[in-house]
Amino acid sequence: MAFSSSSESPIHVVILPFMAKGHTIPLLHLTHLFFLRRSNIAVTIFTTHANSQFIRQSLHDTKALIIELTFPQNFHPEIPQGVESVDKLPSQSLLVPFCKGTKNLQPEFDTILQSLRPNVSCLISDVFFPWSMEIAAKLNIPRLDFDGASNFAMVFYDILMTQEFPVDSDDELFSVIPSLPDIKLTKNDIEPEFSHPQPGEHTDFYTEVVMAMSKSKGIIRNSFYELEPEFVDYWNKEKSPKAWNIGPLCLLATKVVCSEEKPMCIQWLDEKLEKGESVLYVAFGSLAEMTMEQLREIAIGLENSGEHFLWVLRLPEPSTGDEFMSEFEERVKGRGLLVKNQWVDQVAILSHESVNGFMSHCGWNSVLESICESVPLLGFPITADQNLNARMVEEYFKIGVKVVTRNGSVRGFFSSKCIENKVKELMDIEGEKGKEMRKNVNKLNEKARNAMVEGGSSWRTLNLLIDEVICNKN
Ligand code: UDP
């Protein structure tokens, strides 16, 4: 690689993204951002064969080098050969074995990393690869972690896992700590594996993750200071390593421009716009697992709400020919469009003028994308940090509402009646609450954009990160 245009010595960033879209996509946006911000930068991305096409497509307009590592085979009896990403796992309960299996990538990764030229300045590694710390230490280069979550989620996880709260049940609300905004939580806001850790594979793996993180030079957070200032301050005062908030990175996503190539769902949205019909977008990210019973309940709720909707859904494989769903599709024809087991351009959908609400599992990327397109949310959390995110959407950002379970527990079954009512509440654009949510999301949208432009908080943070950590100028 030649860097004749710059007198400064070249910076070489290596990125090791985890094999899940929600973890990979922000790091691809970050790659674009690096090239926009520095002319003397080289970026190398490590991936595996089955994951590389997505990465190549996304980075085709950059000079990023993409290296494919050989994904290990037969490392776990329940993970079929050829499965190289989390979305392809037979069950999400195999996440930890999958993560542990990636350690087999280490020898090849270490060898190639040492041979790269220009010499590597910094390694940006997903937190799920604690093994990448060893080579960073050996080469004496900084390792930065990427965890894909918000600051509040990481702060709350830390507090819920390390402090005692005198509650009678996992669903009892309690105040967290006085120095933080008064958001009441329950133990059930985090997964039982974290609220009640047991000795075993899960706890061992996350202990490794935390150990590696503690040796890192920082954590890259896809967020911006103005979105959650108290939590950024709390983390950087009480915890380490430092969190560098350089997002929202989805603002780097490229929009669909060519009308001839418009996907069918965008054409459908165009038709809705022409007719002046407002659309609810329904999607639960790239990994969510739901029972057919819950999917049917969502269908009934959507049907009874009377709203127009675009539902992108992952159907469990044997149920693709489900009779109930086929009949439902027929009944809502014209008003509702189902896109089954297909990848869509979510940012393009959210940015469509007809879309006025997003029923989402509240994965952190989805929340940020909704904010960046000024679309209020209906939270339908399923797992991981999603309960916390959905809670914050409603109670802290005040940019949406969330479904509640039949028995009031944080976790459980969401009834069609509740879904219907919440959809109506979200889509009531002229109602007092509808107006308030839209005003708040517009304000956050403006703050997000300001954070990313020259001189904004995320813009300055990225500059500092490059100078202080990546180039090690201090
Ligand atoms: N996504 C997309 N098209 C799809 C499904 C997902 O573009 O068909 C993107 C979505 O825009 C987001 C990411 O995949 O950037 C999902 O991340 P999120 O944190 O919302 O949820 P996860 O999939 O990690 O649960």
Image (tube, grey):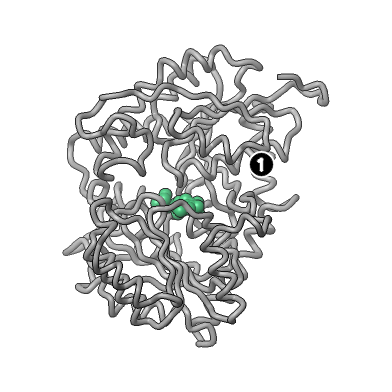
The percent coordinates of residue 427 (x first, y second) are 47, 79
The percent coordinates of residue 379 (x first, y second) are 39, 67
The percent coordinates of residue 447 (x first, y second) are 64, 62
How many marks can you see? 1
Q: In which quarter of the view is residue 260 placed?
A: bottom right
Question: For numbered disc 1, what is the local secondary structure?
Answer: helix
Instruction: Name the quarter where the C terminus is drawn.
Output: top right
Whether residue 171 appears in this view of the structure is: no
Whether residue 21 appears in this view of the structure is: yes
The percent coordinates of residue 112 (x first, y second) are 51, 15
Residue at the image point whose x is 62% and y is 55% from the top: 261
Left or right of 121 in this view: 22: left
User: Which residue lies under the disc numbered 1?
Assistant: 33
Q: Residues within 10 Å of mark 1 (few under 14, many from 20)?
A: some
Q: In which quarter of the view is residue 211 placed?
A: top left
Please tell me which residue lies in front, 30 or 259: 259
Residue at the image point whose x is 69% and y is 46% from the top: 460
Left or right of 23 in this view: 414: left
Q: Is residue 455 above or below residue 310?
A: above
Please tell me which residue lies in front, 320 or 104: 320
Residue type at the position of mark 1: Leu
Q: Is residue 127 above or below residue 278?
A: above
Instruction: Name the quarter where the N terminus is drawn.
Output: top right
Q: Is residue 99 above or below residue 349?
A: above
Q: Is residue 211 above or below residue 277?
A: above
Beta carbon at label 1 within 8 Å of ligand 1? no
Residue at the image point whose x is 46% and y is 34% from the top: 51
